[in-house]
Each structure stands twice: as C-alpha cells, then as structure tokens.
Image (spheres, helix red, strand yellow):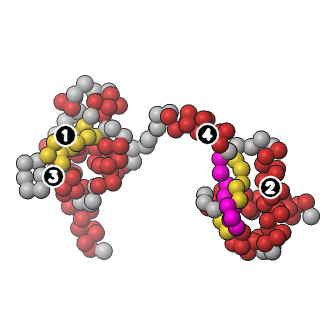
C-alpha cells in the first residue's frame, strides 16, 4: 500500500507543480482514479510531510482546490535570485534584427520588416528589453514611426567603441546575399 501511496503522491505533486494554479479536488481525484475523501486525505498527508521536512514549497488548500506554492519564508531568497542580472540568449532572429538595426540605424520597424520579410515586433521588443537597442527618435513622416538604434550596452557586449568599428560588407557579399534571398523566395513560390 505504501508504494501505491507514494506513487499517488508523486502524481498529485506533478499535477500541482505543472498546473501552477489551484486545481479542484474533483479533478485531482478523477486523475488518480480515487474518491474525493481519499484524495483529500492523501493531499493532507503530503501537506504534513512537506511541513515536517522543511521543504521550500507547500500545498495550500483553497476552498475545494489545492495549489503548490512557495513558502513565504523563502521569499527573500527568491528576491535575491530575481535581482540577479538575467542572462539572455540571442537567437538567430534576434541577431538578424540586431544586425539590421546596427547597420541601418536609425531605422523603423517597417524598414526592418521589409529587409527581414516578416513581422519584427517581438524581436525589436526583446532587443529593447535586453538593452541592446532603443528608441532614438521619430521619423518625420506620416504617423511619425519610432526610430531604433543600438545602445552603449550593445557596444560593450560586442567589444567595440562605436558602430563605425562594425565589419563592413563588401559589394560581392551583398550580391551573394541578394542571390540567396531571391533563390529562397523562388523555392517558396514553387512549393
């Protein structure tokens, strides 16, 4: 019976952890294929066990639902983690968008989208969030679209003193890029 209880506790724990919000007792009971009274007893045993083992999480009962939460005495440690600088990964999409901003700045989202051929809102917003790009003004045109450029953080991250130090692309490379892009577009049209 202990093996089955341990297995049921594991199932309940995974349900509460994965859902991240409160889960109704009836749904948990249906998932573990037991009645609500038995399920409630198992969950209460788990709550006692979590308390006695000084774990960082607890199960809270909210009316006829249960939710896995962090214990409030752990908040200060979570705050320490949250205050640490975030490490972020620059995906190919972000690098492509950043390179367009770096070489064409000041540039509007519309210009970026023309070059990339796809919507770029998310990529530009992420680069602004990462402090690699920023709003540098507005274009003097209808709608006054925002202009974007790189930041000092961009220069630091890429170990350059100014955007003038960015590698230059020779005309032959530009022609190769254009040819590759045209071939890619033609392949998509043929499909």
Residue 42 at what x, y percent from top left? 82, 62
Q: Is residue 171 above or below residue 6?
A: above
The mark that comes first in sequence, 4 or 2, is 2
Q: What is the x, y in percent for residue 96?
A: 30, 48
Q: Which residue is mark 3?
A: 145
**Magenta-colored stretch includes residue 66:** yes
Task: Identify the residue under disc 4.
Answer: 75
Is label 3 in a helix, a strand or a loop?
loop
Q: CA distance from mark 3 to mark 1?
A: 11 Å
- Mark 2 and mark 1 lie on one chain; the one further toward the N terminus is 2
Q: In percent of the image, x 35 and y 43: which residue is there?
A: 129
What residue is drawn where x is 18% and y is 48%?
146
Which quarter shows the C terminus?
bottom left
Closer mark to the observer between disc 4 and disc 1? 4
Residue 74 occupies which quadrant of the picture? top right
Instruction: Tell me which corner region of the image, top left, top right, bottom left or bottom right, holds residue 127.
Output: top left
Query: How many neighbours does mark 3 have within 10 angstroms: few (below 14), some (14-19), or many (20 or more)?
Result: some
Residue 11's x, y, as percent? 74, 62
Residues in magenta, as a range: 62-70
Quickly name the residue at label 1.
136
Query: Mark 1 falls on what kind of element?
Result: strand
Judged left or right of residue 8, residue 156 is left
Measured in 3D between alpha carbons, the distance from the residue under mark 4 to the one under mark 2, in whole angstroms, is: 22 Å
Q: Is residue 85 above or below residue 50?
A: above
Q: Nearer the viewer, residue 62 or 130?
A: 62
Q: Residues within 10 Å of mark 4 (few under 14, many from 20)?
A: few
Magenta residue check for 56 = no
């Amino acid at each position: 019976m202990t093996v089955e209880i341990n297995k049921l506790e594991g199932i309940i724990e995974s349900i509460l952890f994965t859902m991240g919000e409160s889960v109704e007792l009836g749904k948990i009971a249906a998932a573990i294929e037991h009645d609500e009274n038995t399920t409630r007893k198992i969950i209460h045993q788990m709550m006692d066990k979590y308390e006695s083992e000084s774990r960082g999480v607890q199960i809270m009962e909210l009316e006829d639902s249960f939710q896995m939460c962090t214990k409030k005495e752990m908040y200060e440690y979570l705050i320490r983690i949250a205050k640490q600088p975030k490490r972020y990964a620059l995906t190919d999409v972000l690098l492509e968008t950043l390179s367009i901003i770096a070489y064409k700045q000041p540039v509007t989202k519309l210009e970026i989208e023309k070059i990339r051929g796809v919507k770029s809102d998310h990529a530009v917003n992420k680069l602004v969030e990462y402090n690699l790009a920023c709003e540098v003004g507005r274009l003097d045109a209808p709608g006054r679209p925002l202009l974007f450029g790189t930041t000092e953080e961009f220069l630091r991250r890429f170990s350059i003193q100014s955007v003038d130090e960015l590698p230059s692309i020779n005309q032959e490379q530009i022609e190769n890029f254009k040819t590759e892009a045209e071939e890619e577009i033609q392949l998509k049209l043929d499909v």
